[in-house]
Every structure is written in C-alpha cells, then in structure tokens.
Amino acid sequence: SQTWLLFHHEQYNSQCDQDLSENGHQVCNEAVCVGPAPTSKSYLNMDAIMDAIRSTGAQAVHPGYGFLSENKEFAKRLAAEGVTFIGPDTHAIMAMGDKIESKLIAKAAKVNTIPGFDGVVETADDAVKIAQQIGYPVMIKASAGGGGKGMRIAWNDEETREGFRFSSQEAASSFGDDRLLIEKYIDNPRHIEIQVLADKHGNALWLNERECSIQRRNQKVVEEAPSTFLDSVTRRAMGEQAVQLAKAVQYSSAGTVEFLVDSKKNFYFLEMNTRLQVEHPITECITGLDLVEQMIRVAKGYKLLHKQEDIPINGWAIESRVYAEDPYKSFGLPSIGRLSQYQEPLNLSNVRVDSGIQEGSDISIYYDPMISKLVTYGATRAEALSKMEDALDNYVIRGVTHNIPLLREIITHPRFISGDISTNFLPEVYPDGFKGHQLEVGNRRELLASAAALYITAQLRSQKVLGNLRVSSTPVECTHWELCAELGEGLYSMEVEVDGGKVEVSGQWNLASTLLPLTINGTDRMLQCLSRDASGQIVLQYLGTSFKVRVLSKLAAELNSYMPEKVAEDTSSILRSPMPGSVVAVSVKPGDTVAEGQEICVIEAMKMQNSLTAAKQAKVKKVHCKPGETVGEGDLLVELE
Amino acid sequence: HPAFLLPDCRRYSVGHLSVKERIDMKRKAALVGGGQKRIDAQHKRGKLTARERVELLLDPESFVESDMFVEHRCSDFGMEQDRNKFPGDSVVTGRGRINGRLVYVFSQDFTVFGGSLSGAHAQKICKIMDQAMTVGAPVIGLNDSGGARIQEGVESLAGYADIFLRNVLASGVVPQISLIMGPCAGGAVYSPALTDFTFMVKDTSYLFITGPDVVKSVTNEDVTQEELGGAKTHTTVSGVAHHAFENDVDALLNMREFFNFLPLSNQDPSPIRACHDPSDRLVTSLDTIVPFETTKAYDMLDIIHAIVDERDFFEIMPSYAKNIVVGFARMNGRTVGIVGNQPKVASGCLDINSSVKGARFVRFCDAFNIPIITFVDVPGFLPGTAQEYGGIIRHGAKLLYAFAEATVPKITIITRKAYGGAYDVMSSKHLRGDVNYAWPSAEVAVMGAKGAVQIIFRGKENQAEAEAEYVEKFANPFPAAVRGFVDDIIEPATTRKKICRDLEVLASKKQVNPWKKHANIPL
C-alpha cells in the first residue's frame, strides 16, 4: 500500500554506509548515506540526518523506532525546518520521554503508578542510598532509554553499584544522556501494554493490548495480541487510563502505554512510548487498522476515523522477534555474520515478516541484532500458534546463529500455551539456561530416521555418475542398509528399509534444498538440513533445534570406536570472546592475580556491555586485547596461568 | 592327519599339508598381518590396520587383492626364518571400487616390520601401479611405514626408486593420491611428494626427510615430531600436504568423497554426477557481496559456495597460502576446478606460495580434463625483498605458465580488482580464456588509482582531481570490455547460470599445444 511505502521510504531515507552496502531496502525510492556504521556517527547523528532530509526535499519524516524516534531535539529541529515529524508533538515526547516527569503526569491523570522513588541519580553511593530507601529489589535504568536498554535489576548494594556503572555507561553510549532512574522492582509481573491513537483534535482511542511478557534481559522476544490474561473489565480499565494519560499530555499520533500487571490483575503504569512500537503489527492484525497510515493522517491534521466501539478484537496474532543471537548463551548473545542463505516463510498464509535484510546481508556489530519480526495470525490463539510453528520451521537463516530454537520452544511450551507466563518465564522454565529441544523417544527415532534417509540418499546419489561407461555394472545399490547413528552421547544402530520399515520417511530428497519437507510415519514435518559432510556428520534442524547426527555404515561405526578422543582445550585458563564486539575495558594486566569471578574485561556488542570474568583464581599470563579493539567470537582475549 | 582323506588334494611332501590347506593357512596368515598383538597396538595408537583401511575406503566387497602370497626374499640377519615371513609382506595391494568407479590401492601394513619397505613390498606396489596405468584408473596409496627395510639394504632403496619412477610416469596419466596415515620418513617421502595429492591424518601421521633425533645431532635444533613433520606443519607452513583430517575414519570417508570429483584417467572426461541444484539458479546474494570501498575485504569462499552445486566445495590446501583459494566443486553435476584470489587474506595478492599453490592445482585440472573457473580480485604481486629474494619472478611465472598452457575449458570472472601483471596471470583472455566475464564492480587497470596518478602526474598539483579522473576512466569494467578483453559484463546473480551454460558448450572444446617432448615450466 501507499502508506507502507512511505513508511519505509521515510524510515530508511536515512541510511548509513553499512546498510547501503547491503543494498537491502528494495522498497526505498531513494536512499541517502548518513555516515559510517557506528550509530553515533550515522543514525544518531542529527546533522547528517538533517542534511539527508534537505537533500531529498522530504516533507515529512517517519522516524521508525529506536534511534531518534523519541528524541525531542530531533523533533524540534524538524519543526524549525518546516518538516513534519510523523509522531506526537515535541511537548508530549518531552513529557513522556522523561521517566520522572511522565510518572508525575500519570499520577495527576489518575493512572496507577509503581511505588518507588523518582529522581535523577548522580553517583553510585546515591544509587545505593535510594535503593535502600525503596527496598530491594530495585530496577536501575536510563532515564532516556526505552525498553530494556541500560536497565539492570539489583538485589543488594553491590549489585546496585555495578548496575549503576553499567547502566550509566550504556545509557551514555546509546542515548548520549547518562541520567538514571531507580524504582521498585515488581517481582513476577506481566508486561502488558495498551496501544493508543490520538489526533490533534482531542480525540483518543485505545486499540487493545499487547502482551509482551516473554522477555530476556528485559527485551521482548515473543508478543501477542490480545493477552490471555485480561478480562474485558481489566482491559477497559487499562485502556481508559491509557487514554486519560494521552489526553493529559495532548498526545497526538500512535503511542503505547506500558503497564506491569501482577497476578491479581493490578496494573501499574510503567512508561509511555511516544512512537510506533516494534510489535505494532500484532495490533494491526487484530484491529484491522494500519497504524502508520493513521499516524500520517494524524500528522496531516485529520480527525480520527474510528470511535472506541469500532475497535474490534478479531482473532489472535503472535509476533516472534527473530534475532541474530545465540540462544544457548544467556537466552541470546549477539552473533554476527553474513546471511549466506535467507528465505522468509512467506509461502505460508497468514504470515507477515517485517525485515530490513535479504540474502547476502551482513549482520554487523553496530546495530540491534534483530533479523525480523515474524507475525502470524489466526482466528484463534491455537491457530496463530500452529501457524507460528510452521513459519519458524520454514524460515531459512544460514550464516548467523539465530534464536529460532528458543522461539519455537517458547511457543510450544505447555506453560506458554496455557497462558501461564510472566516476565520471568525464561529463567523459570530454563533455570540452567536454554538447552534446545529435548528429544523424547519418538522424536529421537524420527530424527535419526530422517538423518539416515538423507545419508542414504546422498550415498545413492554418489553412484549416479552420468554418461560414464566405466562404472561397475554391478553397483552397490541395495535396499537394506545397516547404519549406526551417533547423537549426543548415545549410539543408535538402525536398519532402514528404504521402501518401508519401522520408521517410514518419505520426501522429495532434493539434496540441494535448504528445506526438507518429510513425511515421517504419516506426520508432515519440515526439517532443514544445515550441513552434511563426507564424514557422515549431518546437522538437521528439527522442531526448531539443530541436532548433530553422525551417520556411519556399520563397518565405519565399528572402526570409529578405535579412534581416539581428541583432548579439548583447557578452557579455565583462557578467556575467549563469547561473541563478536569491541573491547570496552581491560581490567587486568600480565602478572596480576585474579580471583574466581573477578572481572577481566568488558566487551560491548550491539549496544550491550558484557563483563567477562575469571573462571578460576590465577595469575594473568598474557593479555591479547586492548580497549577499543574489535574482536570476533572465539578470539583469545586473556590467558591465565 | 586328515589330508589323506581328501583324494582330490595333491599331497605335498614337506609337512604333509595339502595345497588347499596351505593356501588357506597362508590366506589366514595374510589377513592378520603382524598378528593380533600388533593389531591391538595399532588400534591403541588410534590407527586402523591396513586391511581395515582398505575395507573402509572401498565399496563393500569390491576389493580384489593381489599378491597375498608374496613374501620378502631377505635371507640375512635371520630374516629367512619362518617366523619372520609374513604372507603378503608389509603391504596390502589390489583394486576395488569407490561408488562403482575403479581404483587401485596399496595400504602399508605397520604391523609387519613396521610397514617397512622391502623389495617384495615395492614390487607389489609397482605391480598395481602398472595395472592402473594399463587400464587407466587412479592409484590411492595409504602410507604407514617406518621406512626402508634396513635388513635388505640396497634392495629396499631400489624398491623406492622403482616406485618413484612409476609415480613420475603415471603423473598426468592417472590421478595419484597419497594418504599419510602414520610415519613416512626419509626417501619414502618422495613418493607422496610426486603424487597429485598428499593428505594427512592429524596427530598420527608424520612426513620428514630426517627425524627429530638426526635434526638434533646435525643442526642442534630441538624439535618434536609433530612440529617437524606433523599434519599442521605440512598443511600450514610447508605446503607439502593438501589437507589434514581428524582421524583414520574421517580421512578415509573423505577420500571417498574426494575421489568422486576425479576422472579415472587423462583419457576420461571430468565426471558428471546427478545434480539436484538447478543450473539456472539465480544467486541474488552475490549482487551485494562486493563492498563499495575497494579497500574493504570480503570472503571469496562466500562467492564460491553460493555459485557451485549445493555449496559443496572440496578445498585443497585450505590453511596454506590462504590468499588464493583452490579446490574442486561441481557445476550442474560436472566436476570443475575453482581458483580464486582471497581478498580476505593479504588483499588477495599473489606471492610465492600462492602462485605455486595455484599453479600446481591448475596443472592437475588441465592434465585431467577438469574445467577451470577462476574468480579474480587481485591487487597485484606482493612487493618486497622477501618476495624478490625468494624468487617471486620465477615462482609467479609458474602460475602464469600453468594458466597459459592449460587447454581445458577456462572461464574467468573478474569480481573486483584485476591489476597489473596479476591481471594477465589470472586466466585472462590473453592466455586463451574461453569465457571471461566482469562483474559491474570490476576494475581492470595497470594499478590502483592512487599509484597511477602519482606516476602520471608526478609533482603536479590537483592529485585528488586527477585521481578522480583516473577512477572514472579505469576503475570500472569498460576499458577491458571495449577492447574485448572481457566478453561480457554480467549481473553477479546470473553468474552460476552463465557458467553452467558455458560449460555445456565448452564440453566439446578441442585445443592442442604445439608438439614438444615436454614443456619447460620454470621450476
């Protein structure tokens, strides 16, 4: 549609080198380079963006989300140049952008607010004092930041100090504003937000809620609309308070009022986002409204088209945030790479994928690691979830580590399906960290049979030499294969009857295809073959998780038992970078003695700082990195003795 | 004794055993080599026995053994005693099939006299090499030998020479592959060195002229076996070996895979395997792979993987002279040799090691009818005293020579830089390239704009302006295209499709070089 094009045109009319080289935005009418890859020099560089606006003669700017979307300074400068900012007025951004002021306004507008302390924090000691007054646990975050950026939870004085230091550094690097806020942390809450839409004529609507409780490190992972938790009374109460707040600040455009909801359905105002949210598509799905179109109408001064009673909840929508990150490390540490193969599941119905990348794009350390927003829609929640399962299975991403294993586990988890979730869902369900799909006997058999069938297909194909008369007239082709497959610790031997047998696997067996649509004992499954090598190693993505299976002939398996185990590197005395990023600080030098758990260095990747600690008490032997250096995943940083 | 009960068996006077019994006994003895104790020791070292290796390498039940009854003929130092005789001696030889395709194999048996090479051992190897030459089939040698059979002295040396001679005569006639699966020291190393490919097994194989003890006594250097001649040394430092594998099983399974790429002899065409990857597949990711900045690196392997069938690329020497990438792949099922400059390493420049690595690979492909596809992004030859003193002129000439001499189908794609003499070298039109393409990002020029301007406009002002003019003029594919030095400027996404189509046409290419006894490549 027209508005969609405009949205993308405006959003991406500011691009930087990094994106331009990807040539990723086919929808752009025009793209302007706004600087080199680091965001502080490009998307956060207002001068460069203003230049871009002037050079293209843009009449309006849609700031998208993140970066300058809630920057009052930016909105002011646009106003000064006579360029329409597609978003709320500056005063509303200012009022809601400041967490302290926004709470005061919310209180005044009779919106439920979280008990806690409102104030700017200057030093670590102040932070501790304030935290003690409020009572632990407390949450520390950047005043200027949205979402989970720069936000830490502290349970004691020490963590408060650490949280203060990290949050202020992150706040400075991401927002250029290091002010912080400390408030009472509500344990086990649900994160439910209300979408509001207001015009410049004093009209405001609430467009129902979005449940965004599935989070890791306070960033959303899976969102849905509506919420399984709200009854119509609560929904209305929240909606009405959200509208009260919007009206109190003469809000115009689309905005989101975030609430924390406790188990008794008490809800507390968290903050208001004066921009389009990443997860807005699910609201569009269930209400049928195009939010960007509405924002542009409002920016142009039109009155709202709809009345509150016109806003429906039609069906159910789920959004999965597909990230370039390793879900096995802290539910997701950033990963980088080039998307060597990339295929969105757009062949399925009721699937929407919003992404800014394509096959061949580089996922770099400079931006948020989000690959796409994957949205599925259905008449019922079950339907939307089943669509999501299919969509995740059909999503081909190669070249970067991604979080599809985690997404698929979440949406198929009994607790999620029953709606029993909170923002602590991930740490509660996976207390020892995410380990991927755990195979049950039946599934294991399916996986092994699929791997074996793929192996045999490849073996048989190796004998198909075309046009060569010098191939033996008695080929080894047979229908009975005795194989042995290794999966994790266990060894499984199997006899696979190619035409039938215990586990019946059939499919098209295209060895070049990324997707493997199989029928296993009558069940349709979409597997993906991630890799296959000469030594029998087959990596299959099955039920979202990738499994390494080694398939060997019976003879090879027997002989393989003589092969020695290779001794793995002693990892306790070396520190490697767990992800690609840049070195922010190195806290040790050769000769220092470090205690177990002591910080050795800090790596920043995708605007997130990670403290790397010593695995044992030891003397530092050698330091291989310097602050400011860029390091890759697995790079050696520090050696201990 | 039961022999007399079998009237159809001729009796043998000594020992009163029937011939059949003796045959069975000898066969049985041959199958256990040096005996169970030594087999166990071999396994303990993480190594398979000679026979296990052959069995795993070849198709089930396809092995046809020869010379199972051959024994060594040494009669000195007590070697003539029965307990020092092993049927088959210290090597297993024969023929078999890999995915139905004929191959000759010898597998040295470390359990018999440490796999040492006797005259009989050498004779067995020579026999299957001669047969391989007669019928035109590759030879795979599985090396696991302590060296010469000292007891035999000069006979053993003669045996080595017999093998070397056959290696040389077979060179370019049938593919020869050496898989080093244990020690291989002294003169013995020259047989693998003469073959087309030398593969090693990590941690259990060694190749050196003299071992660490001799090194210590002669040069006083302290060096371990692994450092001196292990898989890592030869695949990263010396360039003697072409690939290293984790263990015996891994290596043998990979040999099967590798073998699939090769033609059986120089009289056979490059094999075509059934292919599931559409030959007209568009590779859109290639449209964005070359960065805007000419100084920014990218990975040539990304291009190769994206273009070839099923992303299946068997890289040769992946850890040595990484500024050039060589290896085998398939295009629409047909084996091709891929050569590519690697911008990620040393900007993809040509130096001594990369030239030699590239040249040897190109010559293998040419000898065995394997089309060569060359991806060019080369800023030139590496300057400096180290290179000049090392003889970059001589070694660089090898790659030039190899490309120029090759008469197999040659397809070249200039992805970005093709500067200076290195442009000529990299399978250019001028060296009889059959199809030469340029991507829109290609720059064919004598050198980079900066250097060129410094020479053309020495001492003049407005260097920046001149540089911009030079870039405008030469930093694009047009100067080469208007002269017909590239046949077409193509969209990167269409590269696979175009190569597959061209290869079909070039399948019937016939080109011969002038008659000569042999050419004289600068060695």
Image (cartoon, rainbow, N blue to C red):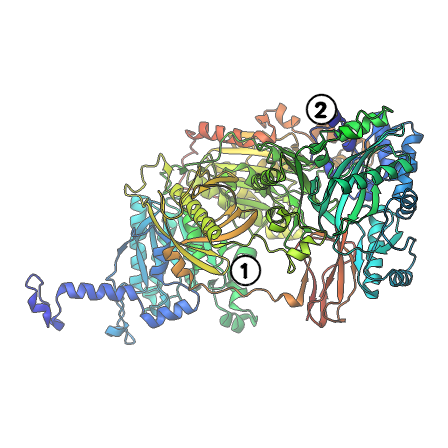
Seen at 53% across and 31% down, the residue is B281
Left or right, B30 with respect to B206, comes to: left
- Residue at disc 2, secondary structure: loop
Tell if the residue under mark 1 belongs to the same chain as the one under mark 2. no
Q: Position of residue A403 (x, y in %)?
A: 64, 47
Label count reads 2
The x, y position of residue B42, in whole percent, is 39, 68
Q: Is residue B373 visible?
A: yes
Looking at the image, residue B401 lies above or below residue A82: below
Q: Residues within 10 Å of mark 2 (few under 14, many from 20)?
A: few
- Asked whether B16 or A59 is in front, the reply is A59
Q: Quadrant of residue B504?
A: top left
What x and y, as percent, mark residue B91?
A: 32, 61
**Chain letter, disc 1 residue:** B
- Residue A13 left/right relative to A550: right
Query: Is B58 on the left-hand or right-hand side of B462?
Result: left
| Image-based side of B71 in relation to A64, left or right | left
Circle 1 residues within 10 Å: few <14, some 14–19, many ≥20: some
- Name of the residue lying farthest toward the front: A233
Q: CA distance from mark 1 to mark 2?
A: 61 Å
The amino acid beneath tag 2 is: Ser
Q: Are marks 1 and 2 in contact (CB under 8 Å)?
A: no
Q: Is residue A373 above or below residue A536?
A: above
Q: Quadrant of the N terminus of chain B?
A: bottom left
| Residue topped by disc 2 | A1
Residue B327 point in image, percent of width and height = 50, 44
Chain to which mark 2 belongs: A
* Residue toward you, A179 or B31: A179
Q: Is residue A363 above or below residue A285?
A: below
Question: What is the three-letter code of the residue carrying label 1?
Answer: Thr
